[in-house]
Image (cartoon, rainbow, N blue to C red):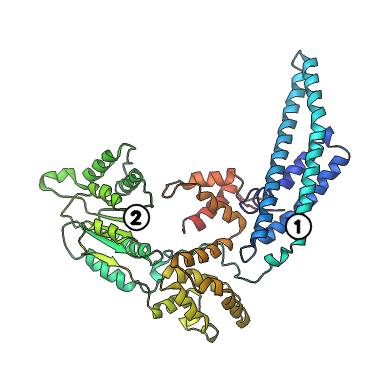
Amino acid sequence: MEGSPVSASLGAMGSLPRKLDELLATRHWVLRGALMDEIEHLTTDLCILYKLMLKLSDAPQEPPMAARYWMKEVRELSYDMDDFADQFLHAHGRAKICRAARHKNKKISRVKIKCLRERRRWRPWITDKISEFRTRAQEAIQRYQRYKFDDCASSPGFSRIGHELPSIWSDADDLVGMEGPTDELERWLINGEEQLKVVSIVGVAGIGKTTLALKLWGKLCGQFECGAFVRTAQKPDMRGILRNILFQVRPHQPPNHGEMRHLINDLREYLQDKRHAMYKIFVRYFVIIDDSWATSLWDVVSRAFPQSNSCSRIITTTEIMEVALACRCFCPEHIFKMEPLSDDDSEKLLLQRMLVPGNQSPQQFDDVIPQIMRSCGGLPLAIIIVARILASQPEKLEQWGSTQNSSGSIFGANPSMEGFMGRILNICFISLPHYLKTCLLHLSTYPEGYLFLKYDVVKQWVADGFICANEGQDMEEVAGSYFESHVMSL
């Protein structure tokens, strides 16, 4: 049994064989005789359960409810056994200290009586626990066979799509349909107007607002004296956002942790160059505020930006028109509404991401491509994810046929685009190895919009036993590679 000691799908199964070996290695007197044989049999049962759990965890489709409930019970068994092993090993360690104290402590009789009392309680307790764990493990194996969960693990579906979650903006230069919006917004931003200009990008989730903003950031940020790119959340941390902006525009002097009004004044004073205050000359800045959800955010942040004559520019992205209007003081000028991709661009992007040579649709794709494009609704993110799934299928006609049949529940009639996106993102998550699922699920313990340090997260992953490293590999380096390849692409 090799793998991470703890995972969301396998529980503590990865660490149990090692702990049981440590338990046997103590050669404690309460473990002698038949009890030692029972522990060895329990270890064998655990190896069987681990393989069965791994088979369901790595299944191409999400297991049915009965199988998921079975996995939950096995995880609970693993946690109970993990607690038992820790309890015994710690007690054994205390007993060693107790024996060492006999040679130094004058009250030998009292120590000896206490140790004997503990020993008498240990053996029946350990015997009962091992018997209980064996019974639960064997019952779990029998239920797996009785309900034929092997059929769930081998049912046809989408094969793995790789260990990286798709990112819409990881290669913005290669995206289809971005040239026109980029050129138009670039003209708006560099038209020579001296006063501060605010441009809002509006569109539904997955349409490419962040991608467009990043593309503009890459092209234009070098033309300004300073700049900042910040992402917000549905419940934004106002002070955190202001500190983030201030840190990016003034990296040589980290912001303080004072009140919000102090941060606003600090940022505003920096953007107005005090050396030339008499002539009202301001720093030329470029700021992008991504994914705004409330007008209150702009009401606060806008106070930090002076109404300068230095050709400074601000871009906001949002799904809500009311927020975009608030950023423009309810003037519809310079609000860019993103539209879905055309059918031609949708097909081009789909084939490009499916790695089809020449972006020409092969004959075996003729039936499935129109169905995919209808379901994706021209949203680049949906198209990219679906293309990634399809590209992972073997290049055989019958396999593409099975993909089309399987896609009926995924690409077919969908009540909402949000539900459709949720289903295909779920496929991406299911396709990840169990240890990566655990690391990503750990991030959900942070509040939305929370800023965390890579160093802290990597340390937590290692300490909690989430990392699966081969012999000779540094655990923190492996955890760092997980972070770089999966968290940075989200």
Percent x, y for residue 128? 80, 39
Residue 460: quadrant of the picture: top right
Residue that carries the numbered disc 2 in the rendered image:
293
Percent x, y for residue 465? 62, 46
In whole angstroms, how far apart are the C-alphas of marks 1 and 2? Answer: 48 Å
Percent x, y for residue 275? 16, 43
Q: Marks 1 and 2: which is nearer the front?
A: 1
Q: Residues within 10 Å of mark 2 (few under 14, many from 20)?
A: many
Report the side of 221 relative to 150 (left or right). left
Report the side of 120 relative to 281 (left or right). right
Marker disc for residue 143? 1
Report the side of 104 relative to 453 (left or right). right
**In the image, residue 124 above or below residue 385:** above
Residue 154: quadrant of the picture: bottom right
Q: Is residue 395 visible?
A: no
In this view of the protein, which residue sits in the foreground, 308 or 447?
447
Report the side of 172 relative to 120 (left or right). left
**In the image, residue 298 above or below residue 56:** above
Under mark 1, the amino acid is Arg
Q: Residue at x 38, y 49 (%)?
A: 235
Q: Residue at x 86, y 44 (%)?
A: 37
**View extreme (top): residue:** 106
Circle 1 SS class? helix
Residue 31: quadrant of the picture: top right
Under mark 2, the amino acid is Trp
